Image (cartoon, coloured by chain):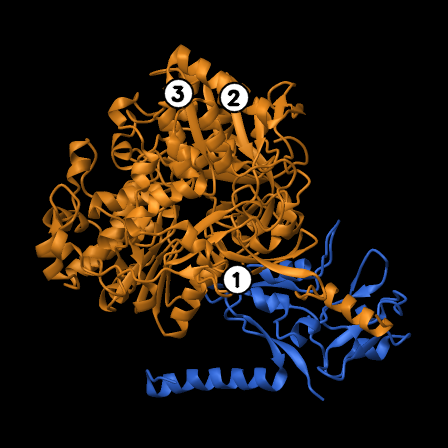
Chain colours: A blue, B orange
């Protein structure tokens, strides 16, 4: 089964929050306290005398073995065969919050109608060869999306390039 | 249509997929929330904007967008948009207006302005424009045609002081050649927050292994990524630059050929920087001597190297122009001036964009010589500013309104005026009340617009046309992508209509926006008609790239024809000719008696990603990201004061206090607090004196003064 997912490069994330609002713009999250399916967490620590600030952008991870699917009493959550995206049928949802308790990432959000809503990886856009809204806007390219095999291959290539450069100096790909 | 097909189309519409079946169309627009002019793909359905995305083929942002740009839907359709011309019927500031027609509004304005001109001369009417910059040449032309020398803009506090400083030293301005450089000395700029879609240049530089030295008190993402972060005390940039020059000269790392052939005043400069040993510099800046030496060596030994400064951080100090001159002197000292990978001189055209095109912008906007008009506001106080910058100095405006000297100022025609821009913003607000006639053109009913006699509704960039020519020579003319909100109009159309009703008899302006642009770009043979044929924009070809090392042929446009370490113009005007360092007017060193009561250093106005001055506060999406006015304070300082995260605190200077929330963060070093500006109800500019300014440019010292923070006792300030 094909599995799509997000990739994230923490060294590039600047906490600019564009992904958060791009998600709200795409999903028309408006009104009082509109939910965002993606959020950005700031993390600070002092390493020796060096203060470090990092940001982490996170949403639904579209888990391979998704706990939200397991706990949903009405089977409203399922994994799409085509791309492994975890989706919710809001017509079936009873708003019991089980998925919220099971999810390690805080992905399920509850809207005004009491039912769950979450990131769907913009799968309709992906079908049309468009990137998810949050990935498309990311000014530094910290966020990516695609089949996870491709994403991990890219990461491996990038890491080996860094190793190679440190071992043999400047060299062109 | 079958049930299945129906569901599938509903899914496409929900995902906002453009196409015939969904009725969603992508139209090309420009974002004008800031001045970067990012291209935006506007998703339109049934005449309404439903989504925005960066335009891939626009080289300004290459498909990227920032948090503000993607909020355009809420910005454009905000309920506080002004929908028709308004006439104030209540007290000034009361927000009691009645709608009137455009005809009535424009006639009333023209009648009153011509009356005032008749009674006390055209100079008693001021023409001001805020942000962004696209309408500027038109407003300046209107002002001069009217006979008033007092065209002024928000550039009285932003960007132009760096241009002034660079022209004093080099006779021109320059841009960092990021694509070809091997080392970036980034001086107090946070590109990831100030121009996120363009910051990819820094990411790519990092990937290429370009060395980065980051200077500044704030701990930004670029500080983390940099090879060296020189975390100076705010306001001490000048001292650090002199200290770096000291190391470069002592260790013989400077470009002897450039210095001996192309510079003036080097011996004087060398003698002055001798004082700034690493130990002395370390004491002033708060750095360690080794850090200064390491930074100086890395910058001077890596060739080519470029210096990046922000639009105004380096000049927002009471020694701003000289600090900036000290920084940019390093470019010539190391031979990186107008060389590939260094700092490249590219002529700017059409509101300060480095495109290299010849234009008639100056001829277009300055229709009268200065000698034909009265003295500009601020001209006597800031003669060097007035010599180089062809505008009045707006920071002097409230003083002249209040004093009536040297002549009375009675009326203001403003486009996007915000009194919170001024240091001592309450003083500017008071002066607005004193005006006899105030017209404000804006998108929103702002706190400033509430003081206007007549308010005119401007349309957003998505409801009108705009020309953008980027430094990469990509040109686009946009058509309106949605109908105007309410009865709003394009700023330029408002200016053209005003010109007619004022009987200014300007045939060129009367021909309209496009004809004026054709006039401006005529020397480069660029015509709007041609650009229009390419709705998605085009790269203007056939123009030679701006070459390097042009000074070898032309010399420098300074009195000596050379780069001036010692400025002849400053000497003649009675200022220090060298880029001397002076402490901020209020600092622990210059005013220890004040520091005893106000021990923390206050720096203000550093960009937050979601705000652009005050214009995004009202937009729910961006406001939701930082709903409260917050002061950044180091956890150590917080602990000493018993302050916890999100607690209400009082931020005070000798001038006043505001109530804000504490944000404990390593973003600021111990001893420094950082506050964003312009927040309604917690305006930090009220804490800064109206005359806390740089003596050469008049720029406010927003970035370094003294303050204290205490826990709020619950009630009053």
- Please state the chain letter of the residue tagged with numbered disc 3 in the rendered image: B
Badge 3 marks a residue whose secondary structure is helix
Numbered badge on residue B400: 3
Residue A46, given in percent of the width and then of the height, sits at: 51, 64
Give me the C-alpha separation between circle 1 and circle 3: 45 Å
Query: Mark 2 packing: few (<14 Cα in 10 Å), some, or many (20+)?
Result: many
**Host chain of mark 2:** B
Horizontal side of A103 relative to B318 (left or right) equals right
Above or below B231: residue A129? below
Q: Residue at x 44, y 68 (%)?
A: B203
Nearer to us in this view, B505 or B200: B505
> Residue at point 18% right, 39% down?
B577
* Contact check, label 2 and label 1, Cβ < 8 Å: no
Please tell me if label 2 and label 3 are on a single chain: yes
Please indicate whether residue B100 sits to the left or right of residue B172 in the image. Answer: right
Q: Position of residue B333 (x, y in %)?
A: 18, 57
**How crowded is the residue under tag 1: few (<14 C-alpha within 10 Å), some, or many (20+)?**
many
Which residue corresponds to mark 1?
B55
Disc 2 and disc 3: Cα gap in Å?
A: 22 Å
Classify mark 2: helix, strand or loop. helix
Q: Chain of mark 1?
A: B
Residue on which disc 2 sits: B109
- Pointer 2 with pointer 3, Cβ within 8 A: no
């Amino acid at each position: 089964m094909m599995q799509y997912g997000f990739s994230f490069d923490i060294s590039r994330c600047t906490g600019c929050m564009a992904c958060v609002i791009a998600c709200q713009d795409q999903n028309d999250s408006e009104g009082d306290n509109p939910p965002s399916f993606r959020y950005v967490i700031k993390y600070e620590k002092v390493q020796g005398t060096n203060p470090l600030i990092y940001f982490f952008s996170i949403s639904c991870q579209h888990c391979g073995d998704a706990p939200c699917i397991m706990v949903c009493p009405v089977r409203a959550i399922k994994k799409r065969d085509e791309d492994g995206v975890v989706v919710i049928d809001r017509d079936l949802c009873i708003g019991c919050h089980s998925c919220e308790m099971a999810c390690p990432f805080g992905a399920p959000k509850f809207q005004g109608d009491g039912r769950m809503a979450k990131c769907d990886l913009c799968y309709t856009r992906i079908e049309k060869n468009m990137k998810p809204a949050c990935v498309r806007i990311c000014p530094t390219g910290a966020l990516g999306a695609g089949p996870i095999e491709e994403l991990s291959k890219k990461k491996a290539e990038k890491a080996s390039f860094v190793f190679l450069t440190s071992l043999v100096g400047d060299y062109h790909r | 249509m079958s049930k299945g097909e129906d569901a599938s189309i509903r899914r496409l519409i929900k995902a906002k997929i453009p196409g015939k079946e969904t009725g969603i169309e992508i139209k090309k627009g420009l974002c004008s929330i800031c001045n970067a002019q990012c291209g935006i793909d506007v998703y339109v359905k049934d005449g309404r904007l439903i989504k925005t995305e960066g335009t891939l083929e626009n080289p300004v942002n290459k498909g990227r967008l920032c948090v503000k740009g993607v909020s355009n839907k809420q910005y454009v359709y905000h309920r506080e948009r002004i929908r028709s011309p308004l006439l104030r019927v209540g007290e000034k500031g009361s927000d009691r207006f009645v709608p009137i027609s455009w005809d009535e509004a424009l006639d009333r304005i023209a009648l009153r302005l011509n009356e005032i001109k008749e009674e006390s001369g055209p100079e008693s009417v001021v023409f001001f424009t805020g942000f962004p910059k696209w309408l500027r040449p038109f407003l300046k032309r209107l002002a001069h045609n009217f006979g008033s020398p007092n065209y002024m803009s928000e550039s009285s506090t932003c960007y132009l002081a760096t241009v002034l400083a660079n022209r004093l030293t080099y006779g021109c301005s320059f841009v960092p050649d990021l694509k070809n450089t091997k080392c970036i000395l980034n001086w107090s700029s946070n590109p990831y927050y100030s121009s996120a879609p363009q910051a990819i240049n820094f990411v790519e530089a990092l990937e290429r292994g370009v060395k980065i030295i980051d200077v500044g008190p704030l701990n930004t993402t670029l500080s983390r990524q940099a090879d060296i972060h020189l975390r100076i005390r705010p306001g001490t940039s000048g001292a650090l630059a002199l200290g770096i020059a000291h190391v470069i000269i002592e260790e013989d790392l400077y470009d002897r050929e450039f210095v001996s052939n192309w510079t003036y005043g080097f011996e004087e400069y060398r003698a002055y920087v001798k004082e700034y040993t690493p130990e002395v510099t370390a004491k002033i800046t708060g750095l360690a001597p080794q850090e200064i030496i390491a930074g100086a060596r890395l910058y001077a030994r890596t060739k080519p190297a470029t210096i990046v400064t922000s639009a105004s951080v380096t000049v927002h100090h009471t020694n701003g122009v000289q600090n900036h001159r000290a920084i940019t002197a390093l470019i010539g000292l190391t031979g990186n001036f107008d060389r590939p990978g260094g700092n490249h001189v590219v002529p700017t055209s059409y509101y300060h964009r480095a495109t290299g095109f010849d234009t008639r912008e100056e001829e277009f906007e300055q229709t009268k010589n200065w000698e034909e008009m009265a003295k500009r506001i601020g001209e006597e106080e800031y003669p060097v500013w007035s010599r180089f910058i062809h505008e009045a100095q707006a920071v002097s405006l409230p003083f002249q309104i209040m004093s009536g000297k040297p002549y009375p100022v009675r009326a203001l025609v403003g486009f996007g005026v915000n009194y919170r821009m001024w240091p001592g913003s309450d003083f500017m607000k008071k002066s607005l009340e004193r005006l006899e006639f105030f017209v404000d053109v804006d998108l929103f009913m702002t706190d400033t617009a509430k003081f206007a006699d007549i308010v005119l509704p401007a349309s957003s960039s998505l409801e009108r046309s705009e020309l953008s020519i980027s430094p990469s020579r990509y040109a686009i003319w946009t058509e309106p992508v949605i109908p105007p909100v309410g009865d709003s109009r394009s700023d330029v159309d408002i200016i053209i209509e005003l010109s007619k009703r004022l009987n200014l008899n300007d045939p060129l302006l009367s021909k309209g926006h496009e004809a004026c642009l054709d006039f401006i770009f005529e020397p480069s043979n660029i015509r709007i008609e041609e650009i229009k044929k390419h709705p998605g924009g085009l790269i203007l070809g056939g123009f030679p790239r701006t070459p390097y090392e042009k000074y070898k042929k032309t010399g420098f446009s300074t009195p000596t024809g050379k780069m001036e370490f010692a400025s002849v113009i400053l000497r003649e005007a009675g200022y220090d000719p060298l880029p001397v360092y002076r402490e901020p007017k209020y600092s622990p060193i210059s005013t220890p008696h004040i520091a005893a009561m106000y021990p923390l250093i206050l720096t203000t106005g550093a960009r937050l990603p979601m705000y652009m001055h005050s214009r995004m506060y009202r937009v729910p999406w961006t406001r939701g990201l930082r709903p409260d006015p917050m002061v950044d304070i180091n956890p150590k300082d917080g602990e000493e004061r018993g302050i916890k995260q999100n607690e209400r605190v009082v931020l005070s200077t000798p001038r006043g206090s505001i109530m804000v929330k504490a944000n404990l963060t390593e973003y600021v070093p111990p001893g420094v607090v950082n506050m964003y500006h312009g927040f309604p109800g917690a305006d930090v500019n009220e804490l800064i004196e109206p005359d806390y300014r740089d003596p050469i440019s008049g720029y406010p010292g927003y970035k370094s003064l003294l303050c204290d923070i205490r826990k709020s006792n619950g009630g009053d300030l």
